[in-house]
Amino acid sequence: MTAPTSQTPHATRHVPLEDTDGVPSFEASGGDWSDIAEEAARLGEERIVVNMGPQHPSTHGVLRLMLEIDGETVTEARAGIGYLHTGIEKNMEFRTWTQGVTFCTRMDYVAPLFQEAAYCLAVEKLLGITDDVPERASVIRVLMMELNRITSHLVFLATGGNELGATTIMILGFTAREEILKVFELISGLRMNHAYIRPGGVAQDVPPGAIDSVREALVKVREYFRQLEDLMLANPILHARMKDVGVLSLAAAMSLGVTGPLLRATGLPYDVRKTDPYCGYETYDFDVPTHDAADSWARLLVRVEECYQSMRIVEQCLERLAKPGPVMVEDKKVAWPAQLAIGTDGMGNSLDHIKEIMGTSMESLIHHFKLVTEGFRVPAGQVFQTVEHPRGELGVHLVSDGGTKPYRAHFRDPSFNNLQAVSMMCEGGQVADVVVAVASIDPVLGGVDR
Amino acid sequence: MTEPTSTPATPPAGEKADAAAAVKPGEPAPAGTQRTSAAALEAGSQNVPAAAPRTPLEVVDVRTGMFGVAGTGDTSGFGGLVRTVAMPGPSERPYGGWFDEVVDVLAEVLDESGTGYAAAVESVVVDRGDLTLNVAREHLLEVVRALRDDPDLRFELSLGVSGVHFPHDEGRELHAVYHVVSVTHGRRLRLEVAVPDADPHVPSTTAVYPANDWHERETWDFFGIVFDGHPGLARIQMPDDWPGHPQRKDYPLGGIPVEYKGATVPPPDQRRSYS
């Protein structure tokens, strides 16, 4: 199929004043909805504006969609965000560089490891220690990110299926995701919000048996994917609901800054892992799947294929992990002094370390205390680091003033940017297709609002 | 704290000797020893990474002490410590790699149009492998249009705008930072526009990069930078009736009242912390 030509990229414009003379208009943002509806009814306006969300099961959280409809046709669609704004970026300015990981992992909670990786890569670039990060740490980062990409795409398939009424797809998707979350729990200690990747490396080496667990999980995940594909790829209902719905052409995607599977579904193989490799992605063998239909169905196919490519990368990571090595930079002014260990009373600093700081070395104690409470200083300057997030290009803009805390941390979240395309995807379509179009963007509001 | 002392300027070695003579062990330090001298300010620039040819430093702040306490309460011994905070200054040619080519092409395009490269691009900063162009706001639109449209530049993808607030960088308090990518040539660079707090206006780039629509709204919301010509510069994250711009450094933060003899936990920016 060909991309529509009627879609010329444009920014949202003001309506010229002379066009609105004599036409009653109602401002939706910030007002009380019942007042607006009342006024519209009083003036006898035929126009119907539907406020979808912010509490709507198919809005992936707290997204608010303001739809102007004419019968079943959407004539205007606007997205309202900010309902989940938690000020994470501001909070990071009052915590050390290492503590920042704990904050940014909570932004896009479906793909937490990507925020961690992007943030740590940016801190390392500011410190000038990018080349000092041990290879094993980079391999573990890639392993975790690619597993996370699969879980994130599984959530897309699961919730997207659920929104079309396919509960089986949802159950299968989440069950498959659970297999990988178990691996995350084994390696990082947590299923989500890991704070596992740290400036200089990763918090802890993979525990014994983790590589086998990943291999076993991959077998199960492949099996679930086969079932999902059987359920979805030839499903006439999914075809009818998703094909030619929410089309966004290449030109529109580029001008709206839309990246990730949405951009690749228009045919452009733009992937930061290939164009600006980080964590050694240039040494892995993988393809960048694309499609040319630019509709919701194409995005689904691209995501499914990406999961298989991620599995390919994960297998290469597992081979490389056979070789032991350090997982943190050698610089003791950056690397955390203690390794964690499981004791009889749970997880904590290893007994050897406790023995050293409490019994033998006062200097070790001082060093531990200073590094953990004060943190390390980062030379003044700014960097911008991007990684390929499951939803597109995630950018981290970090500014340091030479202190122990970020002076400014800004995250360019891909869902935040991609949601701008809602208007273009939905206008002129049916109300029911709005759900499909928004699902195909796969927004996670934790990342959008931060 | 930044005023220079009344002592006559002496070469560094001499001053060191003078200081040693002035403060003898066991004697109380004379009043005013904690005041900042020009030499101390100069010495504080060690926080800036040493790299290739650098001209004047862009000082954005001057810090004293170590623990955020001043006056007699500071028993740390670091009370006299003075450090200047400076961002990496402008770089000299050659910038290295493709940076020179991009700057050359941009200069050619701008000179042809009559604007002039020197008027539009205030300085070029190459730091940590990133290219940053400091652009004058009057010519921002022309620069981004040239960056997007010239076949040798083709920065067709914008990754948005973010703001930074430097309250001590007088006349340039608010910075808007643009990140653009050239998919065609596989390059990325950064544009930085600095405006005074008293006149926080920057032309909107939404006509060139529609992607910047929400990003500019966010920067307005958080920093109060007004993007002139934006189609609907409304708040995006904060509620519409929110007072102030929360990411600014002078935005008041809340303390937490605790139920113990009326005590309150001070706001994060007023707590003792490592500076």
Image: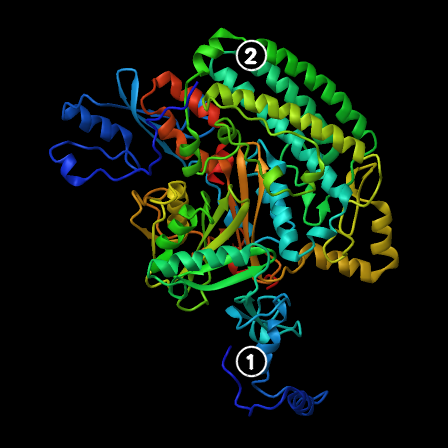
SS type, badge 2: loop
Q: Kindly report the distance in space between the C-alpha atoms of the residues bearing marks 1 and 2.
A: 71 Å
A5 vs B37: above or below: above
Going by the numbered disc 1, the residue's amino acid type is Thr
**Label 1–label 2 contact, CB within 8 A:** no
Q: Chain of mark 1?
A: B
Q: Is residue A395 left or right of residue B251?
A: right
Percent coordinates x, y for residue A65 in the rendering: 36, 28
Query: Where on the picture, by quarter, is residue A433?
Result: top left
Question: To which chain does the residue with label 2 belong?
Answer: A
Rendered-image quadrant of the C terminus of chain B:
bottom right
Q: Is residue B25 left or right of residue A307?
A: right
| Label placed on residue B232 | none
The quadrant holding residue B137 is bottom left
Q: Position of residue A336 (x, y in %)?
A: 74, 51
What amino acid type should be assigned to the residue bearing mark 2? Leu
Which residue is disc 2 drawn over?
A: A233
How far from the left and from the top, in percent, is residue B17?
A: 69, 90
Q: Which numbered tag is attached to residue B36?
A: 1
Q: Nearer the viewer, residue B181 or A20?
A: B181
